[in-house]
Amino acid sequence: MSTIEAPHRAKADRPAAAPPAAADQPLYATRQKVYPKRVFGLVRSVKWAVLVLCLALYYIVPWIRWDRGEGVPNQAVLVDMWNARLFFFWIELWPQEIYFLAGALILGAFALFAVSSLFGRLWCGFTCPQTVWTDLFMFVERWIQGDRNARMKLDQGPRNANYWVRKGLTHLVWLLIAAATGGAWIMYFNDAPTVTREILTGQATLKVYFFFALFSGFTYLLAGWAREQVCTYMCPWPRFQAAMLDENSLVVTYRDWRGEPRGKAKAEGVGDCVDCFACVHVCPTGIDIRDGQQLECIGCGLCIDACDSVMAKLGRPKGLIAFETLKNLAASQAATAGMPAGPERHACGMKARSVPRFIRPRTLLYAGALSAVALAMLGAFLLRSTLDVTVLRDRAPLFVRLSDGSIRNAYTIKIVNKTREEAPLALVLQAPQGFALSVPDAATDPAGRPLLSRRPDGISQYRVFVTVPPGQRLPESTPVSFRLLDAGGRAAASQSSVFLGPRS
Amino acid sequence: MPTKIEKDSITGTDTTGHEWDGLKELNTPLPKWWLWTFYATIVWGIAFVIIYPSFPYWRGTSGWIAREAIVAEMAEVRAQQEPMLARLREATPAAIAADPELRAFAVAGGRVAFANNCAGCHGAGGQGAQGGYPALVDDDWIWGGSLEAIQHTIRHGIRSNESDEQRQSMMPRFGADGLLTPAQINDVTEHVLSLTNRATDAAAAGRGAEIFAEQCASCHGERGEGNREFGGPRLNDQVWLYGSSRDQIAAFIRNPRMGVMPSWQGRLDPAVINMLTVYVHALGGGE
């Protein structure tokens, strides 16, 4: 669809400057400040709800407590860098299980692809942090400086006390929100109550203050100043999201077959668009949706609310701008080609539409990949062992000949205990007759088996010897296996290795 | 040079003037803040060069040097280790081995000290090498494998003439100095082989036994069981420092070689010597 990939469109609400001569084309463009107007409607209500939900999640989650017992952090969600543990409610991950994080990111990516192919840029328009915080900052701006016209007037007006008070107040509130945002980020890596107290009393480490300032500063910069520039110039997602969209995706669309030609409300022979620019004025990225699909559109749908309220006032059907597939748009365009403006054209165009195809190879593929990754993650989680044993055979020397001629191999056994259990485990060697196991540092149980104690939530290491008496026939390499038995005699973990002897 | 700069009808933006198989590219102007960001990185770069050491003989205004940072960090870690090292210095090896905390620290530190100081002769894993570098992982000890004996050996060395308490022993050059005739040496060799049931000439071994009792037993023991007091190695076991073949044994009797180990007292911190003692003892042969 060439309409999807069409690059930069003209900004319709900007005064058309006289086209400069070729040599005069400026190398750098000055930013056009956007003054989004307040809007009411269904989409806006949903957007507010999503905003409140996202912010609440972000700010509240670090404060949720989760009792894990003595000496263990009681924060439900915590990335404990110092002790290299990731706590997530009842789950406690070690660094070597970082693939769960990778899996979660892959899951997120496929979910993003699936949602985009179904409903367009829902992520960009509703849940992206850039959108959520920009929306919040705009709310503050509107609250202190007034709506679109008041803000434009303020910027163009004199730099008087009113100007500086309103601007200063806006930036102050922005900075406070940014500080809360940066502070909340730190809380995911530190105990929330402790680090909050430390930050406020000036006792936190330099590292904490650095990251606090970094995240706060960038929140202020990106949501207060950069805004739509982030989406248009910095973010890679708008550049390749076109690959996820197709003619069956629901995207924010202006039904030009119904709106054109534009004209005054009472004029004869014109379409439904009254050229009131309501859609342009509410757009947070300052574009005109009537120009068609464009890279700058984040799919937030605020223009739908704006247009619907105008249509309602005029007593015309809503939906001149709507979440619509490009396939339906093309069908309506074809059905109404050449028809004069009026209710018949509208009815004919709407009739030409069909139910969007949600089930299609692309969405099935994304859903399949999503399910596969989700299942793999679930499987990996359910099969995740909380007790591992690793066996490292000594390589220098490969074997030792003792005075009496017996051959000995040494192994380093590591017990990885991801639980807080402390009960010792009995070590058993599975090997041919005559192979004798000894662990110098371990006690033995009544059956004479070495009892290895284990550190709770840690790694215990033992040096283990296996000796074969002289005279026993010994191949160069004999497979052996070490098993750890719990108090009930059940195998808790096992690991195989080899026993090496001299070349015969 | 671009030749056909034209205005795109939809966007009103100039093209670059190039055409690729019918495709033209818009020459969209860059946002101005991007340019300012670029200038800011240049300013940052210049400031970086001034503040940090960027040229030889230029320490920068901050005076920060990576080498000094690592030295300071090492000193910090050393200071953290100091209480532990002080305890290791005071304690006897037996006390260290009995205390789990001290023992874990000593084994970990001993591994590093062993790699730095001992592995050159005794091998990375203490496996030793044929020809005079004793293995430390087996259960055969020339001078004793108890914690005290190992500590003494490390402290004072062997035949290095660096300490009054060094391990000292000397095997006569029976062949080179004419103490035994070649035939007698052959007989003694046969007897030594018989200690591990490898003799092929019973008569020669019998003659050798008499010479052995006279010349060798005082250090190597009557039955070749060795004598740790004089550093006389065991001859009735399977561990041979200089090789176990008939030729190797005969050659050794004719002209023995004896290894040297430096005295580490004064070279290494007493704490490190204690750590090495515990580490070597834990390798597998400790008694």
Image (spheres, rainbow, N blue to C red):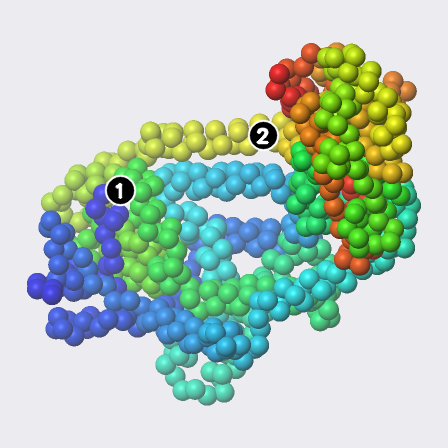
- Distance between the alpha carbons at the discs numbered 1 and 2: 41 Å
Q: Do the residues marked 1 and 2 share a common chain?
A: yes
Left or right: where A210 falls relative to A491 = left
Residue at screen point 48% across, 30% down? A371
Q: Position of residue B96 (x, y in %)?
A: 87, 46
Residue at screen point 81% across, 32% down? B233
Q: Residue furthest left?
A: B3
Q: Which quadrant of the figure has residue A159?
A: bottom left
Q: Secondary structure at mark 1?
A: helix
Res. B108 in view? no
Q: Secondary structure at mark 2?
A: helix
Which badge, 1 or 2, is on the more N-terminal residue? 1
Which numbered mark, 1 or 2, is in the foreground of this view? 2
Residue type at numbered disc 1: Leu
Q: Quadrant of the C terminus of chain B?
A: top right
Residue at screen point 69% across, 11% down? A473
Residue position marked by numbered label 1 in the rendering: A326
Q: Residues within 10 Å of mark 1 (few under 14, many from 20)?
A: many
Instruction: Pinpoint the chain carrying mark 2.
Output: A
Residue type at numbered disc 2: Ala
Q: Position of residue A259 (x, y in %)?
A: 23, 52
Nearer to us in this view, A276 or B163: B163
Q: Quadrant of the N terminus of chain B?
A: bottom left
Residue position marked by numbered label 2 in the rendering: A380
